[in-house]
Amino acid sequence: MIIGVTGGIASGKSTVARAFAARGIPWVDADEVAREVVAPGEPALTEIAEHFGCEVLTPDGGLDRRALREIVFADAEARQRLERITHPRIRRRLAAHLERLQAQGAPYVLLVSPLLFESGQDAMVDRCLVIDVPEETQIARTAARDGVDEAQARAIVAAQMSRTERLARADDVIDNSADEAGLAAQVTELDRRYRAAVGLPPGR
């Protein structure tokens, strides 16, 4: 069984994934795979440079993420073009990673992806787990973590799928606005339910 884990920026997806990992559950990070497919030497990077120009490359030939982000953040057509270049490649590589993890015999595996719904990666999973926090919490965490001002943080949150829509598409929800003990209790309960769904007793 594959559980898709998603949530808005600064909702705590990696924190939740590490909590599941402590219970023996492996995970694949779609953000890491997305970085892999645009690494120097990858066909996607060549195609991105051909379409968007050399200004999206760093002096050493890597991807200048900030420059590319500025282009696609303000231009929906450019963003869609970038997604057509990267998303199919990301999905193929994610599928390979997930297959490898499943072969290792874990009760279930996680696909952690901020764009689970937007990219269509939800079609790859059996259940969708949304990590939820209030938008004001997201904004405060984003500003503190990324060193941006409140206006920039609000713009980033506003550009993502709305909290309402994300929750409407969730099979399961973790409220990550509580303390660590509250989060741990929710992860323990979901781990119990997921193991039961595949016919296994509760883990540690």
Image (cartoon, grey):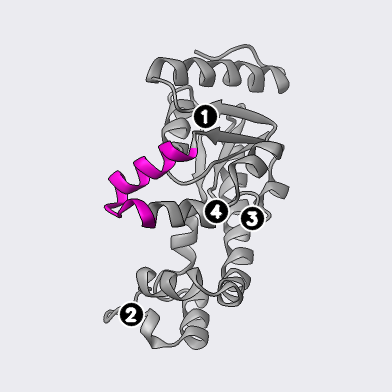
Between marks 1 and 4 in the image, the one whose residue lies nearer the viewer:
4
Asked if the magenta segment contains residue 146, the reply would be yes
Q: Amino acid at mark 2?
A: Gly
What residue sits 57% from the left and 61% below the top?
90
Q: Is residue 108 visible?
A: yes
Q: Amino acid at mark 4?
A: Gln
Q: Are marks 1 and 2 in contact (CB under 8 Å)?
A: no
Q: Amino acid at mark 1?
A: Ile
Between marks 1 and 2 in the image, the one whose residue lies nearer the viewer:
2
Residue wearing tag 1: 25
Secondary structure at numbered mark 1: loop
Residue wearing tag 3: 118
Q: Residue furthest front?
A: 151
Residue closer to the observer: 126 or 203: 126
Q: Which mark is residue 160?
A: 4
Between marks 3 and 4 in the image, the one whose residue lies nearer the viewer:
4
Labels 1 and 4: the sequence-earlier one: 1
Q: Is residue 174 above or below residue 40?
A: above
Region in magenta: 135-152
Q: Is residue 203 above or below residue 134?
A: above
Labels 3 and 1: the sequence-earlier one: 1
Q: Residue 7 location in percent, x, y?
A: 54, 41
Q: Residue 88 location in percent, x, y?
A: 64, 65
Secondary structure at numbered mark 3: loop
What residue sits 59% from the left and 12% below the top?
202
